[in-house]
Image (cartoon, helix red, strand yellow):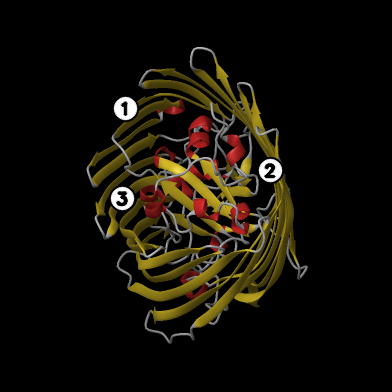
Amino acid sequence: MHCVYALILMVSGSHKDTLFTYYMNEIVVTEHLSNTPLEATIKEIPDSLIRETGLDAVHEILEVIPDVYVSIGRKNEANIYFRGFDQSQIAVLIDGVPVYVPYDGSFDFTELDSDILKKVKVSSSTGSVIYGPNIMGGVVNIVTETPEKDKVNMEAALGRNMDKSVNLFASKRLGRLSFGMDGSYEKSDGCHISEDFIPDLNEDGGVRENSDYEKKIANLKVFYEAPGFGNIGLKLGVIDNVKGIPPEVGTTRPRYWRFTTWQKRAVKLTWTCNVKGTEVRANAFYDTYYNVLDSYDDSTYTTQTGRYAFHSTYDDYTVGGNLLTETKLPLLNIRTGLHYKKDVHRAQDDYDEEWERYEMATYSFGVETDVKLTPKLTTTGGIGLSYMRPLHANGGDLRDPIFTYGPLLSIQYRATAGTKLHLSFTGKTRFPTMKELYSEYLGRNVPNPDLKEERSFNFEFGITQVVAEKHQVSFVIYDSEIRDVIEDVVVDTVNDLEQLQNIGKARFAGVSLGVSGTVGRLDYHVSYSYLNAKDLEGKEILEDRPEQRGSIYFGYKLPYDVKGFVGINYTGSRYYYDRDVNDYLKLPDYTLVNLKLSKKIKFLELYFKVNNLLDVNYERDKGFPCPGRYYETGLNFSL
């Protein structure tokens, strides 16, 4: 078994992808950043670790990194926090293409499947400036499988409550042409919550109310290596899902909601080439989001006659492209990134109501340069420029465009063999979303189309030490100050109306520690993170940001090709706002233990896993109990 866990807190230099592979899938080719200051700002979760843990959901995989916390609340959507920044302040890319619902900038990580993942990379707020706009809190880049060679992989699993899943990946290479296709089907009648859960309003225990889902995913990839022209690629993808949204426990005003339709369609064209020593990568993309959210009268989920019932439809799309270049000179590397995207939001609040339409265009350009000052000292400097222009506001007046800039300065020093120190400073921004600019939030808010961008000023210092070749120790300290944070302000006490305004200031400071390595047949990784998140205005306590997170992972190679895995994850307490008492309270901390055993028999692998082994009763958001003990058995066939 390879020492996969040591890769979590560093970019691996031992594995080199082919140009064909990473050109198609990444904005910043991190193998190119090896021995540069930006290398240390990226944390990678490789394919090997994803397979070892047996985690199915991308948001669960992301929590392998202790700086990441996942919240799952009212709409049963997984939203991430990274070093205090929430998901609206973090860019999410799939194979180099930004993914989000155009209206509100969100994306539900539960809609993704881990079986076709090649790796996941998370860049901090002090990372590269060529990723594009809205990268104030960092970037999550999800890289999927590429048809590099002839391959067939099929997996089938059966879980608690008769949960079913089937996944297929197949690829074929014919000379300069290669094809890849994958598909998955998942169906669940709902998740079991812990036996320690005490029945309450809207939930009697056992199978969680309205937690069923049925999800289908399919992708097709075609690549052609054209002589003298480079590599050309086409990717088509579809996600089709129907799912329930469990009601809040304990409230007298529950929401009986279901996503009766959740669809995403994607088309991506890629081109890569080398022009006189300059590597060029280009992507063009078109993504659609068609989602129907139904609100029902009661827990039968059959009628929609009450005051709060509705049939809300989003019919959104994003179209755009990016162009990335890298030029390597003897003591100098220059990288550039040019991005454009147009977001269109079309919505109908209920049956027979008028459709609303909003449009926004975003442009971005970034350039950064690595300079090797001495054999041990390298520096990177750069700047990112972004421009947001409203195009349509449902027939209303258009606000003025917003222009932002963000500098980058990073230094890496190789003190001795196996010892690296890095220091980074950046300024990053996030544009307000169309929802923040124009939404009335179901009649509770007064729209504010004059919102400005949020700004962050970020610092990071870290050191990595390799010990006896098979062990690594990592330490990072970071500090980010955010200005012009968009927050709700009460503007009408009589009608209980609020408005979003740029009034907030916040600070996220913390440390990350990691120790990993191999001892005989045992691979281990121990990590810990501490976060101090403060509202500098002193008005609010920041919610959903645990002060402490930690994890321990062990992988052991047993006799007879049997592998064992144990994962222990700790999440500290975090604040939430309780409207019943009109004050901030704390959700308790929790520790989850996961196990997996697998046995390899030629082309077949059998496995059995248990998540939440101790059947811990816990909540990520108040009123929304999480799954209890879950067990699954399955087989994986590979050729």
- Percent across and percent down for residue 303 are 36, 51
Marks 2 and 1, the one that precedes in the sequence: 2
Marks 3 and 1, the one that precedes in the sequence: 3
Which amino acid, by three-letter code, is at mark 2?
A: Gly
Which residue is found at the position 42% from the left and 20% from the top?
606
Furthest-right residue in this view:
538
Q: Which residue is mark 2?
A: 418
Residue 269 seen in the current view: yes
Q: Secondary structure at mark 3?
A: strand
Above or below 417: residue 106 = below
- Percent across and percent down for residue 38 are 60, 58
Q: Which residue is mark 3?
A: 238
Task: Pick the quarter of the image with the C terminus.
Answer: top left
Other-residue count near label 1 (Cα within 10 Å), few / some / many at <14 / 14–19 / ≥20: few
Which residue is found at the position 62% from the left and 45% from the top?
9
Residue 302 seen in the current view: no
Which residue is found at the position 61% from the left and 72% from the top?
407
